[in-house]
Image: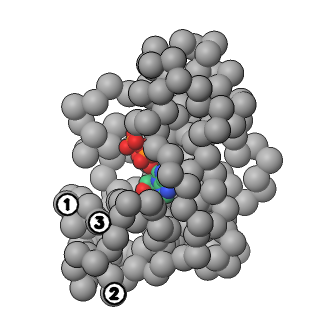
Amino acid sequence: MSARIGLFGGTFDPVHNGHISIARSFLQSDLIDELWILLTPHPPHKSGEFQTAYELRFKMLKKVFSGEKKVFIKTIENELPKPSYSVQTIRYLKEHHSDNTYFYCMGEDSLVQFHTWKYYEEILEECKLLVAQRPGESHEEVAENILKRAHFIDHTPLDVSSSEIRENVANGVSIIDQVPKEVIKVIEKEQLYS
Ligand code: ATP
């Protein structure tokens, strides 16, 4: 059976309320039937940065989205050759689940950087982009060939990022308003970011 799939890639270190709200907005757009979260082992654009173990980031995602029937956490990028170029993932999926239609989902900050992604023109040939607003970002400077393939969805942006959360934990600042309780439990148990 064919389905419209939104692919939402990221490092999710950690997953936060901004990701949850954006995931819901993608689904509420009615442009997709399911959202597949692609947990990236090590994205090309964050090559110099330390990352929390893949299994722990996966565990936090699983806990957060366990109640969302249309959200699936996918580990394919951990199985495919590294670095994890999105075009490789999209082509793999199109080959192995060829009935589906794919959309690549992202926040506006990623759209603004999109022209720096390796093989971004090939991504545009493979699928359309679904983009949700992110605070502090404007897409005025984004090139026409990218905007032509981008569809903006309704979204009330939440001003939160994983880097801010990591910094808050390191400085002993509460993150209770930024991540769900399940995530705080994992961060505390595994002593992440401190
Ligand atoms: P970091 O601060 O470590 O760069 P991040 O918070 O941007 O992390 P990622 O895992 O890198 O999180 O992002 C995955 C996807 O989620 C990207 O497409 C990014 O644009 C989007 N995203 C993250 N936070 C938000 C937010 N608050 N609003 C809208 N989009 C977001």
Say above or below: 43 vs 88. above
164 left or right of 81 in image: right
Residue nearest the viewer, comparing 158 with 125: 158
Sequence order check, earlier mark of 2 and 3 = 3
Disc 2 to disc 1, how far (Cα)?
A: 17 Å
Sequence order check, earlier mark of 2 and 1 = 1
Residue 124 seen by the camera: yes
At label 3, which amino acid type do we have? Val
Say above or below: 44 vs 86. above
Q: Residue 188 at what x, y percent from top left?
A: 61, 15
Q: Find disc 1 in the rendering and name its residue.
A: 116
Q: Find disc 3 in the rendering and name its residue.
A: 112
Q: Are marks 3 and 1 in contact (CB under 8 Å)?
A: no
Q: Residues within 10 Å of mark 3 (few under 14, many from 20)?
A: some
Q: Label 1: state its secondary structure.
A: helix
Say above or below: 162 vs 49. below
